[in-house]
Image (spheres, grey):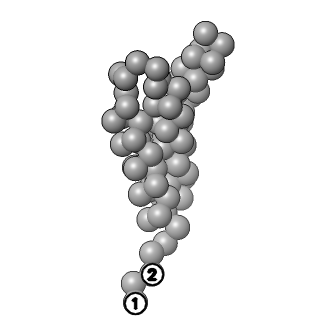
Amino acid sequence: MNEKSLDWYVKWVASISLLIGMSIRGIEGLQIYDLTFSTAGITLWLWVSILWKDRALIIVNTVGVLLLLRNVFQTITG
């Protein structure tokens, strides 16, 4: 039996979350949902990159999380 590791599950949940965010991007009134799904997806990919010890992915996803969180706070505080 081929048992999947934690990173396998996390990367698929992260990817699905990002795809959901991208699929609703630009639809008026759904921006907060896009930001929520995208932030969750990038955060989970950051976790995967840490598990993989991949510095390039850690940097890209850390910056992505920070940029998305800035947009979340901007959207909430309007």
> Is disc 2 in contact with disc 1, using a CB cutoff of under 8 Å?
yes
Q: Residue at 47% across / 36% down in the picture?
A: 38
- Residue 59 locus on image (x, y percent): 49, 37
Count of numbered labels shown in the rendering: 2
- Give the side of residue 31 with respect to residue 24, left or right: right
- Give the side of residue 28 with respect to residue 50, left or right: left
In this rendered view, identify the residue nearer to me: 58 or 72. 72
Circle number at residue 66: none
Mark 2 vs mark 1, CA separation in Å: 6 Å
What SS does tag 1 mark?
loop
- Tag 2: residue type? Glu
Which quarter of the rendered picture does the C terminus lie within? top right
Q: Residue at 33% across / 35% down in the picture?
A: 23
Which quarter of the rendered picture does the N terminus lie within? bottom left
Circle number at residue 1: 1
The vertical placement of 7 against 68, above or below, is: below
- Give the side of residue 6 with respect to residue 76, left or right: left
Q: Callout 1 environment at 10 Å: few (<14), some (14 to 19), or many (20+)?
A: few
Q: Callout 2 environment at 10 Å: few (<14), some (14 to 19), or many (20+)?
A: few
- Give the side of residue 66 with respect to residue 24, left or right: right
- Residue 25 locus on image (x, y percent): 37, 27
Q: Residue at 53% across / 26% down in the picture?
A: 32
Q: Which residue is mark 2?
A: 3
- Residue 7 locus on image (x, y percent): 49, 63
> Which image quadrant for residue 17?
top left
- Judged from this view, the residue extending furthest toward the front is 29
